[in-house]
């Protein structure tokens, strides 16, 4: 137990402090998080994914296994949450909000830096694949859940085509398979943009927290947070054994599965009017509670 404070101080606290630096920008200076979010989404994140793949080349089979693993975790968590929410007789919009906050984790601006700090560049490469998978699932499944069926399949696919990290993933795989390298000036440019991604993600996290509000739905909040912080990593531990994951792959897959609720869910909830105040509260609460579950999880995965 003596290593838990050290794990928290060295791995989780830097992330929380970096996010805290962004909070006053939104709270008192009224900085709009959307422009920073767009820069991260369209420039920094694709560069990060591309460099993770090309600097830490993975076999195609490893890439596909990690993406399948992440998809299965989200499907399993969603199925259990749906059954529990129906048993608790949540009304339709609240149930959709609980599903969003339970299924989709903060694999990007929390999970990726935590994997980097705790387990290094190799784990970060796997975490990047997990993040891409989560982004794809959010863009399709998340939109369908948030819209409660109002969004067509075609609209979801169009949204997927606009996802820049997909192209970064494909391009990275092509470069690895062909043994290509970027020209030095381009490579240095991409590296600079990649290096800006993680600190920008953390500041964005703090900026978005100033929009949090607390409004009832205690049972729904308890279900969402418990599914996200406890059930999901438990399922991931078992599934990682079935997939035969070891070392960085196991560490990244389980740790990413235990991340708090994705900030992106607040955007979906606001866009489709699916209990946005509850969703924001779930993001905030799960992030505040996450050190209590992630610190022992780090200790277990480090052993």
Image: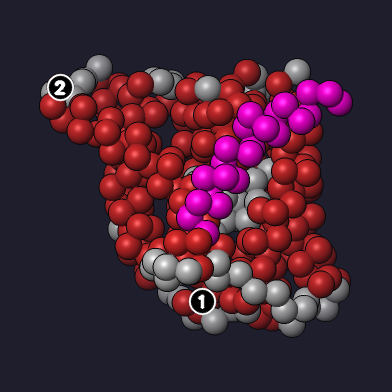
For the stretch drawn in magenta, what is the main secondary structure? helix
Q: Position of residue 137 (x, y in %)?
A: 51, 54
The residue closer to the viewer here, 140 or 230, is 230
Left or right: residue 96 versus residue 131 is right
Q: Position of residue 271 (x, y in %)?
A: 47, 77
Q: Is residue 234 above or below residue 31?
A: above
In magenta, the rendered stretch is: 1-23
Q: Is residue 179 above or below residue 73?
A: above
Mark 1, residue position:
270
Q: Quadrant of residue 252?
A: top right
- Quadrant of the image containing the N terminus: top right
Tag 2, which secondary structure?
Answer: helix
**The magenta stretch spans residue 21:** yes
Instruction: Identify the residue shown where x is 65% and y is 19%.
Output: 246
* Mark before the other along the chain sequence, 1 or 2: 2
Mark 2, residue position:
184
Any part of residue 66 in sight: no
Tag 1, which secondary structure?
Answer: helix
Alpha carbons under labels 1 and 2: distance apart:
43 Å
Q: Position of residue 34 (x, y in %)?
A: 37, 65
Any part of residue 51 in sight: yes
Q: Quadrant of residue 224?
A: bottom right
Q: Residues within 10 Å of mark 2 (few under 14, many from 20)?
A: few
Q: Is residue 44 above or below residue 143?
A: above
Instruction: Identify the residue shown where x is 78% and y is 44%.
Output: 292
- The circle on residue 241 is none
**The magenta stretch spans residue 31:** no
Instruction: Identify the residue shown where x is 42% and y is 26%.
Output: 60
Q: Residues within 10 Å of mark 1 (few under 14, many from 20)?
A: some
Instruction: Identify the residue shown where x is 46% and y is 65%.
Output: 26
Left or right: residue 203 versus residue 292 is left
Left or right: residue 1 versus residue 98 is right
């Amino acid at each position: 137990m003596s290593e838990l404070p050290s794990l928290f101080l060295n791995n989780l606290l830097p992330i929380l402090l970096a996010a805290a630096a962004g909070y006053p920008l939104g709270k008192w200076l009224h900085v709009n998080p959307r422009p920073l979010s767009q820069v991260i989404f369209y420039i920094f994140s694709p560069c990060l994914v591309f460099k993770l793949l090309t600097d830490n080349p993975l076999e195609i089979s490893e890439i596909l296994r990690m993406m399948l693993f992440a998809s299965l975790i989200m499907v399993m968590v969603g199925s259990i949450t749906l059954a529990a929410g129906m048993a608790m007789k949540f009304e339709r919009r609240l149930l959709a909000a609980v599903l969003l906050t339970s299924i989709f984790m903060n694999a990007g601006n929390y999970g990726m830096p935590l994997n980097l700090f705790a387990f290094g560049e190799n784990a970060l490469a796997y975490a990047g694949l997990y993040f891409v998978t989560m982004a794809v699932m959010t863009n399709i499944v998340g939109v369908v859940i948030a819209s409660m069926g109002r969004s067509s399949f075609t609209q979801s696919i169009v949204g997927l085509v606009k996802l820049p990290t997909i192209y970064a993933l494909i391009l990275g795989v092509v470069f690895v398979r062909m043994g290509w390298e970027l020209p030095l000036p381009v490579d240095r440019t991409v590296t600079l943009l990649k290096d800006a991604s993680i600190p920008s993600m953390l500041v964005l996290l703090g900026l978005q927290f100033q929009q949090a509000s607390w409004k009832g739905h205690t049972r729904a909040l308890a279900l969402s947070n418990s599914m996200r912080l406890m059930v999901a990593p438990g399922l991931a531990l078992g599934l990682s054994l079935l997939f035969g994951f070891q070392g960085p792959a196991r560490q990244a897959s389980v740790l990413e599965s235990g991340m708090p609720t994705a900030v992106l869910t607040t955007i979906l909830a606001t866009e489709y009017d699916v209990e946005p105040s509850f969703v924001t509260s779930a993001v905030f609460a799960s992030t505040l509670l996450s050190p209590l579950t992630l610190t022992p999880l780090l200790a277990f995965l480090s052993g």
